[in-house]
Amino acid sequence: WAKEAGRHRMAMFAPKMLEDAYSRLSMEGALRQAMDRGELFMEYQPQVALPSGKVIGMEALLRWRHPKFGLVSPAHFIPMAEKIGILPEFGMWLMRKSCQEAKWIQEKLGRRVSLSVNLSPHQFAQAKLLRTIEESLDESGLHPNDLEIEIIENTLMINSSANMKTLQMIRDLGVGLSIDDFGTGFCNFNYLLQYQVDRLKIDQSFVRQAASDVNAASVVRTVIAMSHGLGVKVIAEGVETRDQLKFLLRRRCDQAQGYFFARPLSPEKFVEAVPGIERMNLSDPSGERAAV
Ligand code: C2E
Ligand code: MG
Ligand code: MG
Ligand code: MG
């Protein structure tokens, strides 16, 4: 019975921390194998011009579906991949994959739409980044002007002289640059001027509150005005409701992205969704949201 008691003691003491550590380790192990096992894929979320409603671009978002853990959020597994050092490998794969898929989408739609790819600060500092971009463009046949890199404000601050060089070389290829989650990082306006940013993405936290909170509304208004002053395009992310859209239209925001228009979609579903999105009447206050 001593053994039995011991086991109970163990069970009693089995700290949640140990369980968490165990599941973290097993998840890290699984993540290392995710690419070889074909568990990674991309989804594409439409980006819409305002006020026309025309689909002008898409953001590539990485997905991981594990047989046991199911669909894991990138907010969870991307930092994990970064920590264990495999994010660069994922990044190279997804740059190739998303350029190919974007080219396929363009062919199906019979027109050019732009592709935005997210890069973490660490990925951005990778020596191989430039070559990966060049090869992905070459292999896919995607026009460099149709590719844009999304980075967060902090990427511009960290290791800035090396990043400055990388950025200049990326720009020399004709690839665009946007600042993601704008307003949530440590923005230095000098960097904005220096780096010749093409587009600012207003963070969803401000967009979400803009229709109801005066302070958030004033942040959104200010970012739009500043972008226009600098000759930079501005896109609002996380647009979910017609009230939010109305606010953005009134403030002359250039573009929008969010569940109101469509969720991130497979390439096939993306192509199918475009006509429906473009039929939405954005200025009609009684109109319903898209059924995607
Ligand atoms: P992000 O780049 O700011 O991407 C926008 C996130 O907002 C995506 O979440 C998207 O699905 C979600 N979203 C879009 N519209 C709405 C909306 O109307 N409402 C709400 N509530 N959410 C909306 P997701 O796909 O879970 O990605 C989370 C974050 O993970 C991304 O934030 C990005 O920082 C990172 N991430 C995703 N894919 C990649 C990738 O390929 N590379 C890197 N480095 N990071 C990635
Ligand atoms: Mg993004
Ligand atoms: Mg964002
Ligand atoms: Mg984010």
Image (tube, grey):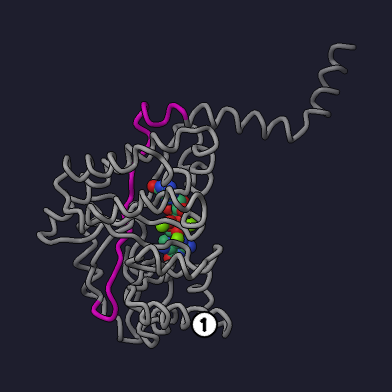
Say above or below: 67 vs 189.
above
Residue nearest the viewer, comparing 150 with 292:
150
Classify residue 16 by image quadrant.
top right
Where residue 228 sits in the image (x, y, percent)? 36, 80
Q: Residue at x 24, y 54 (%)?
A: 172
Q: Residue at x 17, y 40 (%)?
A: 139
Q: Quadrant of the C terminus?
A: bottom left
Say above or below: 172 vs 97.
below
- Would residue 99 be found to the left or right of residue 20 on screen? left
Residue nearest the viewer, comparing 17 with 288:
17
Q: Which residues are magenta?
A: 32-52
- Would residue 68 be found to the left or right of residue 143 on screen? right
Residue 38 included in the magenta stretch of the image: yes
Q: Neighbour class for label 1 at 10 Å: few (<14), some, many (≥20)?
A: many
Q: Residue furthest front?
A: 161
Residue nearest the viewer, comparing 69 with 25:
25
Classify residue 174 by image quadrant.
bottom left
Q: Which amino acid type is marked by label 1?
A: Ala
Q: Residue at x 42, y 56 (%)?
A: 151
Mark 1 lies on a secondary structure that is helix
Residue designated by label 1: 217
Where residue 13 sits in the image (x, y, percent)? 83, 28
Where residue 227 sits in the image (x, y, percent)? 39, 77
Q: Residue at x 54, y 76 (%)?
A: 209
Say above or below: 275 vs 36.
below
Q: Quadrant of the N terminus?
A: top right
Residue 235 included in the magenta stretch of the image: no
- Would residue 67 be found to the left or right of residue 56 on screen? right
Where residue 277 sits in the image (x, y, percent)? 25, 69
